[in-house]
Amino acid sequence: MCKVSLEGPSFATVYAGANMIVAVPPKELPKLQGLQPSYDIGNVLRVECTSSPSYPPAQLIFIFNGNEVHNSLIKQLPTTMPSEDDIVTSTRIGLTLRLEEYHFPDGILNVTCRSTLPGIIGLKPLETTRTATLGISNQPLAQEPPTSESTMETPTLWIIIYCLLMIFGVVAVT
């Protein structure tokens, strides 16, 4: 309850009730840890996201290449509880996932951790984004090099044989 009064002669008093939500927003962007610079298809991605302390506790999500990762893949991780003198707390989530080719459109995986405060209107989400690339061994080459097992094409082989026969005089030029 809040009451404002002024000194002086009599004044009118108005009473009204309303709920007030006190929020302590995070002071820093969420921390995204564990992302390697490069992965191969079939590698396991293990990442964690930790929010900066806030009240209410932040809600965290992972976003891959602009698409929110389904909650069933995300694991809530333990955090330290606030002290008696403090109401703010951090939130942590983790994700373990075997990477497939579709995770790397154009050879790139963008991983974002987004932090929001539930029930607080007008507060923009905080995001941290990191990028991983598809390993060289999984990149298609622009032109495949010839292999040692490759054979000459038939017309080329016949031209070489004909030229050799002409050189040794076996075939007469007319």
Image (spheres, rainbow, N blue to C red):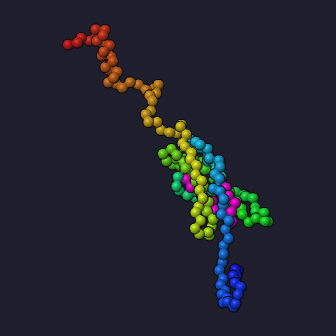
**Residue found farthest to the top:** 169
Residue lying furthest left in this view? Answer: 174
Write the residue at 67% across / 55% down. 50
Instruction: Name the quadrant of the C terminus.
Output: top left
In this view, 84 is above or below 130: below
Q: Which of 93/6 is in front?
A: 6
Q: Quadrant of the N terminus?
A: bottom right
Residue 52 falls inside the magenta stretch: yes
Q: In the visual, does 66 lie left or right of 77?
A: left
Q: Is residue 142 visible?
A: yes
Q: Quadrant of residue 163?
A: top left
Residue 93 seen in the current view: no
Between residue 9 and residue 47, name the one nearer to us. 9
Total residue callouts: 0
- Residue furthest to the bottom in view is 10
Q: Give me the residue at 66% from left, 75% from top.
A: 20
Farthest-out residue, front = 8
- The residue drawn where x is 54% and y is 48% is 109
Residue for point 61% across, 50% down: 97
Residue 48 versus residue 165: which sits nearer the camera? 48
Whole-percent x, y for residue 162 in the image:
30, 16
**Left or right of 145: which side holds 77?**
right
Vertical arrangement, residue 21 with respect to residue 128, above or below: below
Residue 136 in the image: x percent, y percent? Answer: 53, 37
Position in image of residue 127 (x %, y %): 59, 56
Q: Considering only vertical position in the picture, is 160 above or below 72?
A: above
Q: Is residue 8 shown in magenta?
A: no
Where is residue 107? Give x, y as percent.
51, 44
Q: Which residues are magenta?
A: 50-64
